[in-house]
Amino acid sequence: MKRFYALYLALFISASLLNAQNLISVTYKGGRTKAQMVADFGIFMQYGVDMYKFQYATPDVQGQPDTASGLFVLPRVDGASLPLLVYQHGTVGSKSDVPSNLAGGYELAMVYGAMGYATLAPDYLGLGDARGFHPYLHAATEASAAIDMLIAAREFLENDEDFEHNGLLFLTGYSQGGHASAALHRELEANYAGEWPVTAAAHMSGPYRLSGTIQEFANNEEEYSIPAYVPYIILGLNEAYQLYTDFSQVFREPYLGPILDFYAGEIDLGALNQDLITFLTAEAGGAIPKYMLQDSLRQAIAADPGHPLNLAIADNDVYDWAPQAPTRLYYCTADEQVPYTNSLVADSVMNANGAPNVLSVDANPVADHFNCVEPAVTRAIFFFGPMQDLTVASEEVSAPAPARLHPNPASAAFWVEGLQPGDELFLRSATGQLLEHRRSTGERAEWPLKGYAPGIYWLQVLGGKGVSVLKVVVE
């Protein structure tokens, strides 16, 4: 859309005037039509998207000025009043494998954009254009980099007369991104509640309870599919806490060599993981992480809860607080990388702390970490949908279809009206699980409720006029 091209060119011309602000530069990264989004991601995609790389000011892990980067995705709509959404990406393999380079899980940022959210995807410190090594799973900077990108996005959008923020802000992320989105959520509610009130959050498959992680890896004989996560955690947190100047105090040979190569950026995370698996299998008969660590360190962290490494890891737990916004913790029981107990513990503690609306949900009990992404994201989208309050006058899609249902509450059945032949209807549980799918044949359809327990359900109507999400109360 021509206004975006003009805007990003103007931002480059006036870059010298932006140095005192958060936003430093904007680069257009291309776009996708609605047809392309539907072809790639399915019929739920409602809009085309335009994508922009942001460079923006933020402090580094030691509080010194740094330039971070991230991807900003705008739905292709005019006259829009849209919500903002921050998507925090999962663990990536290298410094360049990030959303602003259209890598590192950027597809999910596009998906949220195509669902009608103006979407921010920070690269994180130490990744993308930020200097230094990534402080992996450091909660404070996962939050601060996202908050400063929110401020940069606000500066960007103030120059767009066709966009209006409707005041809603949604937070989500998967894997490391689940940890990062929980860290951001906690920081926003603690210190930015007036400026950036959170509407709802969906944290997915995140390691919310880091404390105890290193002790578990250091003391058991269990194999782990991604042993490279262990040195990554230690190297990353060392950036913030500066516990070690000599990593030979931490890691044994032959593991130290590839770990230092990864730290120097000479190999990526995948290559490191393969080297560690090879060496661990040769020594211990399997990828058992404890054999990477010096014996003296393993003994110290097992015996002393106050060991500096234990304290640094515990400082980055993100489960012991009480979210005030509606929050879902999506996980999969068969996740082999991030134990699902992270979500159960977070649910239990958050509710014990007085959180008014927190629930952990098993998105798919048989899905592993990779295959958990789709069901978790789908549930997050349907959790957010009724709160989205989307108002658009679009060139690509007109206003949402005026579907309506009655009676509501219902017992034996309900009727859906305002349909068009061929509209797709999806009935889902309160947590987003698909229960039944139908296709309309006329302007109205009857939906029998035999076998449905009393409670709240969601009916999504997807048709040529757009999307309606209707709350159904079954008595």
Image (cartoon, rainbow, N blue to C red):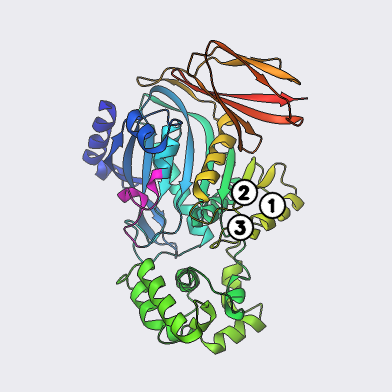
Label number found at residue 329: 2
**Dot 1: few (<14), some (14–19), or many (≥20) neighbours within 10 Å?**
many
Q: First in sequence, mark 3 or 2: give its number.
A: 3
Estimate the x, y position of residue 3 in percent, counting from the top left.
28, 27
Quarter of the rendering containing residue 133: bottom left
Q: What's the residue type where badge 1 is placed? A: Asp
Q: What's the residue type where badge 3 is placed? A: Val
448 in the magenta segment: no
Mark 2 near mark 1, Cβ–Cβ under 8 Å? yes
99 in the magenta segment: yes
In this orientation, does residue 196 appear?
A: no
Rounded to the nearest angstrom, the CA distance separating label 2 from label 1 is 7 Å
Q: Work out whether 390 lies above or below 349.
A: above
Q: Nearer the viewer, residue 25 or 424?
A: 424
Q: Which residue is mark 1?
A: 347
Report helix, strand or loop for mark 2.
strand
The total number of labels drawn is 3
Report helix, strand or loop for mark 1.
helix
Q: Nearer the viewer, residue 384 or 12?
A: 384
Q: Is residue 375 left or right of residue 272?
A: right
**Dot 3: few (<14), some (14–19), or many (≥20) neighbours within 10 Å?**
many
Report helix, strand or loop for mark 3.
loop
Mark 1 or 3: in front is: 1
In this orientation, does residue 230 appear?
A: yes
Mark 3 or 2: in front is: 2
Q: Which residue is mark 3?
A: 318
Q: First in sequence, mark 1 or 3: give its number.
A: 3
Q: What span is colored magenta in the figure?
A: 94-107
Estimate the x, y position of residue 238 in percent, counting from the top left.
47, 73
